[in-house]
Image (spheres, rainbow, N blue to C red):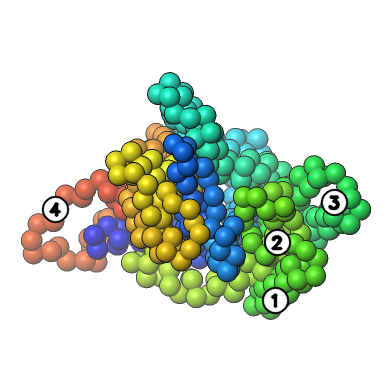
Amino acid sequence: MRELVRRIDAATSPDRDRAVDALRALAILGVVLGHWLVTALVADSGDLLDASPLQRLPQFTPVSWLFQTLAVFFLTGGLVAERSYRTARASGTGYRQWLGARLTRLFRPVAVLLAVWSAAAVAMLVAGVGWSTVCTLTRLAVSPLWFLLVFAALTAATLLVGRLHPGWPLAVVVLVDAARFGLGGPAALGYLNEAAGWLVPYCLGAAWARGELRGRATGWVLLLGGAAATAGLVRWAGYPAAMVGVPGAGLSNLGPVTLAAVTFGLAQCGAALLLLGPLRRLMRRPAAWAPVAVLNLFAMTVFLWHQTAMMAVTVIGLCVAGPLPGLHTAPDGAGWVLARLAWLPVFALALLGCWAAFHGHERGRRPERDHGQARDRRHERDRRQRSRTPEPDRGQEPDRPTAVAVAARTLSPAVPHA
């Protein structure tokens, strides 16, 4: 294992900003754990219905503040897109070719998810599973796709919004919410915020790539200003305190995005900027960097299949043992919370199984020329390493095809942040 960790560290480009990957890893873990903690499937008269512990346990609302990390995704997405397109343009790659490559990598694993769940839905209906159960499971499985659609739209508009000041989309969100809640405008007007709201951190990320977010002062302004604005909106303007959707609630900060969600995202962006220094120091350690590198290589697989993993455990548990605490019971007390925490390792094992089955669809096949270049680079690095490191006294076991081995083979200077 130490050898594989060393190989991952050696395979990483020296100019790669590992803190950006660490931020993205924290964001993906926040989404996964958040969904696993606030999404419950309750067995009711033979059907599975979704519920949330925040409905009956509002004291756990701060959990949504910790695990709703979407703004960090868009912050790093804007940063990476701006850097990536700048590099592509310098190498003579056109915008259409650059965009096609990025969107192909984004949507290739989505097609697999849709195919699997289309077949699963048909199989459940043929087997006599209730319509409400099929709808609940399918909706939860594909619910992450809304984020990808917005992310893809902003990526496609990188050429247009790359130099847009974040204040402009923020002003749109303010106007839309004023029209919705202050002037009684139509609720559908709020869907303008799905683009404008997430464009705020995306534009911040692009500004970061241009070197405009310098110094810790910017991070503190975003963190304190965003937190104060969010608290004021919740306290005096009637916005929900929960930063995730709560079934049965009259208003959600994410359905569609509200001004409170945007200001909360600004606070998260400030915290992310303040964490850069500590994360860069931590990521210099190969043992800390290796899991971050692996998670970033397969972030789409984890994001797309984490709900499926949770539902697979839930359905199998119900079929094998009947209703189980924290898995099929109503989330109405501290006992449910403790039981749900005990289920998290089982969900993680199921997600590992999903990764084993579907991760190959995320990376795709790289052109032979790229494979040859990467192989040449690996051979040169190995030659230099052997010249510096004495051979061990005993023979080493051959590498096993583990996730870390895959990362050691795959991660190279040719692989950009994606």
Type of the residue with mark 1 = Leu
For marks 3 and 1, give the one nearer the viewer.
Answer: 3
| Badge 2 density bin: few <14, some 14–19, many ≥20, Cα 10 Å | many
Type of the residue with mark 3 = Arg
Query: Could you tell which of marks 1 and 4 lies nearer the N-terminus?
Result: 1
Query: Could you tell which of marks 2 and 3 lies nearer the N-terminus?
Result: 3
Query: Could you tell which of marks 3 and 1 lies nearer the N-terminus?
Result: 3
Question: Circle 3 sits on which residue?
Answer: 180
Question: Circle 2 sits on which residue?
Answer: 240
Query: Could you tell which of marks 2 and 1 lies nearer the N-terminus?
Result: 1
What kind of element bears circle 2? loop
Say whether residue 86 is visible.
no
Asked whether the beta carbons under mark 3 and mark 4 sit within 8 Å of each other, the answer is no
| Badge 4 density bin: few <14, some 14–19, many ≥20, Cα 10 Å | few
Question: For the view shown, which residue lies furthest in the front direction?
Answer: 45
Question: Circle 1 sits on which residue?
Answer: 224
Spatial CA distance of label 3 from label 1 is 27 Å
What kind of element bears circle 3? helix
For marks 1 and 4, give the one nearer the viewer.
Answer: 1
Q: State left or right for residue 103 relative to residue 232.
A: left
> Which corner quadrant of the image does residue 221 belong to?
bottom right
Spatial CA distance of label 2 from label 3 is 15 Å
Q: State left or right for residue 33 relative to residue 196.
A: left
Residue 397 numbered mark, or none: 4
**Residue 11, image x, y percentages:** 36, 56
